Image (tube, rainbow, N blue to C red):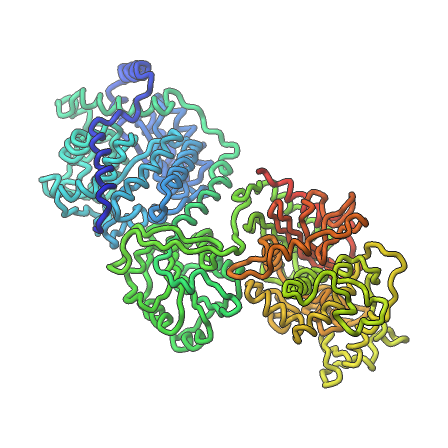
Amino acid sequence: MKKYYTITIILIVSLFILSAQQQHPFYIKDYTTQDKWIDSVYTNMTQKERIGQLFNVAAYSNKDSVHVNEVKQMITKYHVGGLTFFQGAPTKQAELTNAYQKLAKIPLLVAMDAEWDLGMRLDSTYRYPWNMTLGAIQNDSILEQIGERVGAHCKRLGVHINFAPVVDVNTNPNNPIIGNRSYGEDYINVANKAAAFTRGMQHEGVIACAKHFPGHGDTALDSHNSLPTIEFSAKRIDSIELVPYKYLISNNIGSIMVAHLNVPSMEAEDGLPASLSYNIVTKKLREEMGYNGLIFTDALNMAGVAKNDKIVNVELDAFLAGNDVLLMSQDVPNAVASFEEALLLGIITEERLEYSVKNILRAKHKHNLKTFTPIKIDSLVADLHTIEDDILYRKAIKHAITAVKVTDSILPLKNLDKQKVAYVAMGEATGDVFVNTLRKYTSVRVVKEKNLADLIKKLKPYTTVIVGFHKSNANPWKSYKFTEKEIVWLQEIARNNTVILDVFTSPYSLLQVKSFTNIDNIIVSYQNSEEAQEISAQIIFGALKAQGKLPVSIKDEFSIHTGIETTTLPRLMYGLPEAVGVNSQKLQRIDSLAKLVVSQKMAPGVQLLIARKGKVIYNKNFGYHTYDRKRKVKDQDIYDVASMTKILATLPLVMKLEESKKITLQSKLGELMPKFKGTNKEKLKVIEVLSHYARLKPWIPFYIHTLDSVTKKPSSKWYSDSLTKQYSIKVANNMYMNLEYKDSIMQRIIDSDLLKRLRYKYSDLPYYILKDYVEGEYKSNLNKLTQRYLYKSLGAHYTTYNPLEKFRKSMIVPSEEDDYYRNQKLQGYVHDMGAAMQGGIGGHAGLFSNANDVAKIMQMYLQGGNYGDKTYFEAETIAKFNTCYYCAQDNRRGVGFDKPQLGNVGPTCGCVSMTSFGHSGFTGTYTWADPEEEIVYVFLSNRTYPTMSNRKLIKTDIRTKIQKLIYEAIEE
């Protein structure tokens, strides 16, 4: 054992002294009325009915009528006092409980093993994390909240006793039966965690049961299969194993379960289990420790007692030892008969029987079992798995995950533009959620090979290798160990690469690691649940912090309570709507509108994302890439975002130039670009053109001038189906444009007339002009510039021009079956004709992205120009561009950004703040950010497929109707 804080021990020991005077846990304020009821019931019971109260028998909700009839006979003929339910289904259990209780003369005390909630035994019910995971949490109020929820679930199902918490101090890593079921090896931590859980559960009116007395934490055998021996001295047991029990007794725990353990230092008779020992049950627990609550035996059908040839009558011996309730007798009829005989012979006194029976009756009175109220079946399953449970589960995992070793320059991952990240899977369980969440932050390559040499070679180019060790999350007894091969591979990977090892299983798995020297970062995530995988990935990228501490020690390398609190970075988080004041039920209404888009053929598919307060709370995909329904829309699929390019690509570079004083909003085109001097656009200002208040034409159909006047097909003068030096501008698949036409585009803009009247008129032309200026200033194209200054460091891996150069075609959602210009399916080539004529790289269109990447850029704007470990803009710059300078002239636009309508009609639901901003795209895309409600909304679709004449999405205003539902779901 490690050293602990002396002051803490003194404080806790002082509490333990009070346990000798424990108030009875089942007393009520009106104890006189309680006593009268108990005395009345006891007096009117037959001897057989009194004996029956001592027995608690097993019940299953997944067995046949033979078993059901056997349980009914136990109730009607032998008058058992309680049932313990095991495997089955909640609705069936509730129905059986109602039936069984109806047969009982005195209502039954119903128990369950629900250590991590009802999901330990039942399908369709909740499972909270194992105790080992909870032992890492530093805020014990979380365990109290979990206790409350587990108690509420038990109570809803008609369960009065939960055989939890396990308070074994797990000082033996090789313990085959406790392990993850323990809060750890620190008896103080175990005591505090167990007490918090108990408070929560008993607050809900469910009796807690501490087990396995006097302590099963340092055994190498399983008492289900044999009788383990505890070799320690009584002094050692008293100072470690019994500490949690003393604390729980002082906190009025309702019951304690005695284990089948051989404890020579506490019981002199060789091989006599603790559960049958008068010295342990009565002298130690009842008298010395002053415990007044119910004492249960562990199951009497376990090999620890059932296969002991020395024991003739296990039930009688257990009762004589001092137990109140005899759990799962193998032969109730014979046991009852032996009790009747023992009473007749004076082996059992009337006083002894009366003590335990009245103790049981007192528990029943306290828990409203004077009469039984049937369990309501309606909405039972829903009540046993609520959003409140999901929120609390995630909260527990967030507080538990532990950074055991951290290299500050690596964790959390920074400088994403310089990172090349690989993932290597170990363990037999899936790590898909982990990988998919990692990929929300940057490009992560899954690397696998059959032999080590090839793997090491393949990993050589990567700056960081994340090794995820994923083991089964089915139950806490599943193996947590690495294979010998995995250990060798791990050490070799760490010798050659910078490694982050993330262990999704027991921390004891680290005991196998021979050397930690080369493993730069180690995270213990404890369990392989989807929530643990998702949250751990967020910690690696700094969206969340690691804050747990090891509940056990790992060799001499990592002492108990090791835990490094990692730093956070302002990156998007992923979580539940309620965590940011949004009602998830109301938010689900969005699903129906999104499904309507697909079913009514407004678009083949949709990607939808909603974030609030920096947390993505809704990220769903609907429909398919096309109406042939062959490929479903996935998170990583990318869309042609059309005019959203303006604020996601060109505008950031203009803002950067404005910050560096290269331009101002008042700069005139003639000053910036000599080609505009002497033209009708010479005096147009940046602020005017980007506010669409400069009399520029909405667009110019450049491509029409390149079509054959007769055939209306691309002219051979301007296009070739093969790449040459002259025909080098790729417009689409096997379609290349003549270089000569490149300058014609800008010249047509220069020569174009201005509109006669000055008013708001949306135009693409400013972005042709500013693209030309920006690329000239930086001497590079927009694709390279946006990658260099924005996307790579943001981790916007899926955002790019000309996506076929980077991604598989199958990941790119097609935008149209073009029959008027390119005459082919447009998949991976920009839909906008003008952008296509610029090689796919337009200032007004051409960008492809997915909803998650768009959200990163919009979140960066919301955060005043900061995202991750980098500052992209000053907050003042964003504010300057997000200002409506011509509102008085009935022009809602900001500088580049679209803004809310000034009247009743416009680009939003009319429910957003006036500081909000965004943009839409011709292909059926839309994004909007609201600084006041801290909302980012992204809607991506390909409404133009198969034809852009489909305007159903526009006519129905679906995008803004969804936006309205978002705001209606806010409940703060």
Q: Residue at x 34, y 23 (%)?
A: 366
Q: Is residue 761 left or right of residue 920?
A: right
> Which image quadrant for residue 661?
bottom right
- Quadrant of the rendered image containing residue 247: top left
* Horizontal and vertical percent position of residue 614: 55, 51
Visible residue check, residue 327: yes
Q: How many marks?
A: 0
- Residue 90 placed where, x, y %? 45, 37
Tell which of 900 and 605 is nearer to you. 900
Q: Residue at x 47, y 54 (%)?
A: 534
Q: Residue furthest bottom?
A: 725
Residue positioned 53% across, 56% down in the render:
571
Q: Nearer the viewer, residue 953 or 461?
A: 461
Residue 460 in the image: above or below residue 413: below
Residue at 22 percent across and 41 percent down: it is: 9
**Considering the image in quadrants, where does the C terminus appear?**
top right
Where, by quadrant of the figure, is residue 67 drawn? top left
Above or below, 128 relative to 554:
above
For residue 943, side relative to residue 30 (left or right) = right
> Where does residue 679 sit, x and y in percent of width and height?
85, 70
Left or right: residue 407 versus residue 844 is: left
Viewer can see residue 628: no
Q: Position of residue 513 (x, y in %)?
A: 30, 64
